[in-house]
Image (cartoon, grey):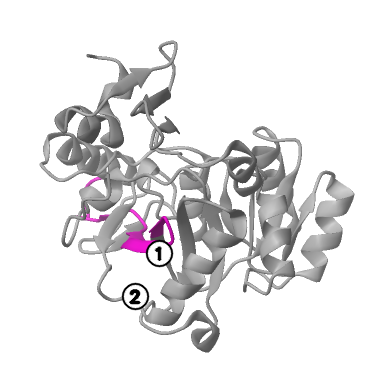
Amino acid sequence: MKDVIYKNSVVVVTLKRKLPFLRLAKSVHFQVGYGCRQRRFAYSDINYSACSRLAKEKNLSRELMEKCGIIIPKGAEVDSFDGLKKEYDRLQKPVVIKPVAEMQGRGITTLIKTIKDAEKAFEIAKSYNKTVIIEEQIDGEDYRLLIINNKFVAGLKRMRPFVIGDGKKSIEDLIDEENEKRTHGKKWVKKILIEDTVHATLKEQGYDLESVPKEGEKVLARMTGNISSGGISEDVTDKVCDENIELAKRAAALFGLEIAGIDFLTTDITKPIADVGGVVAEINQDPDLVMHQSPYIGKPRKTA
């Protein structure tokens, strides 16, 4: 059972409860049950394919949410340097640039304040997809609200990974040290991936990987809190206000998703985002259930 599918949280629960389980051609697709209540999954995605595709394409999902009155960051889809410059000049700085259809934070560059950096970020994002999204960067923390069958199941705050200087070690050594602790620790947390985003984040703070921060100094390793690339999670299920819960349900229903992870950017998840300048940043058709089941801080939720 070294196959990755058997580590899937839904599969683990299915086998534990001895429910009928059918693997489809050794792929990520599987079926639970054989009767009228059977469900087919791709990893944890239970949605109809058309709904999933609509949510996955960030340009389409942005347009749908905007047209239906859901607050999102100002931005646009671009596929050329001319289009990039036009939108860059129009938007407030800093901006974020990301691929039009990627997951787990891949290809995202944040805190872009110059057209030169925007062009570099455009090239990074374009290596994943032919078109990219450029949008204004919103102040606030990153929250994921999990909706299943129109019910709010769990909320998570995703915090950016960081290291603390000791006045002796380089940032690269501090990241390696932190990753070693994470490998042998009991908490469910992934290693901090060192890639272009990390270099850009360090540059924004006046550092590079060889820099030696002062003792006690906090250095952000990434500007996004994606768990898959080293972010730290905290359960906030009991803190989310009713208005934000209803907005998350509305967004999931808008896309016809039975399961959805709605990402909020806001300074205070206990207050409606309309009151504090927050936005709905993204909608995910295949949300990671494990991060709710094993948060780094707070109460585990049995989402699977």
Residue at x 26%, y 37% (from the top left corner): 176
What secondary structure prevails in the magenta region?
Answer: strand
**Relative to 136, is 53 above or below?**
above
Residue at x 72%, y 46% (from the top left corner): 132
Task: Tell me the mark number nearer the camera, choosing from 1 and 2.
Answer: 2
Residue 179: numbered disc: none
- Residue 297 found in image quarter: bottom left
Which residue corresponds to mark 1?
143
Mark 2: which secondary structure?
Answer: loop
**Relative to 42, is 131 above or below?**
below
Q: Residues within 10 Å of mark 2 (few under 14, many from 20)?
A: many
- What's the residue type where badge 1 is placed? Tyr
Is 150 or 221 nearer to us in this picture? 150
Residue lying furthest front in this view? 36
Q: Is residue 78 left or right of residue 267?
A: right
Residue lying furthest bottom in this view? 275
Residue stretch rendered in magenta on the structure = 146-170
Asked if labels 2 and 1 touch by Cβ distance under 8 angstroms, the answer is yes
Picture coordinates of residue 16, whole percent (x, y): 15, 31
Q: Quarter of the image for the N terminus: give it.
A: top left
Is 256 or 158 nearer to us in this picture? 256
Q: Residues within 10 Å of mark 1 (few under 14, many from 20)?
A: many
Which residue corresponds to mark 2?
240
- What's the residue type where badge 2 is placed? Val
- Residue 141 found in image quarter: bottom left
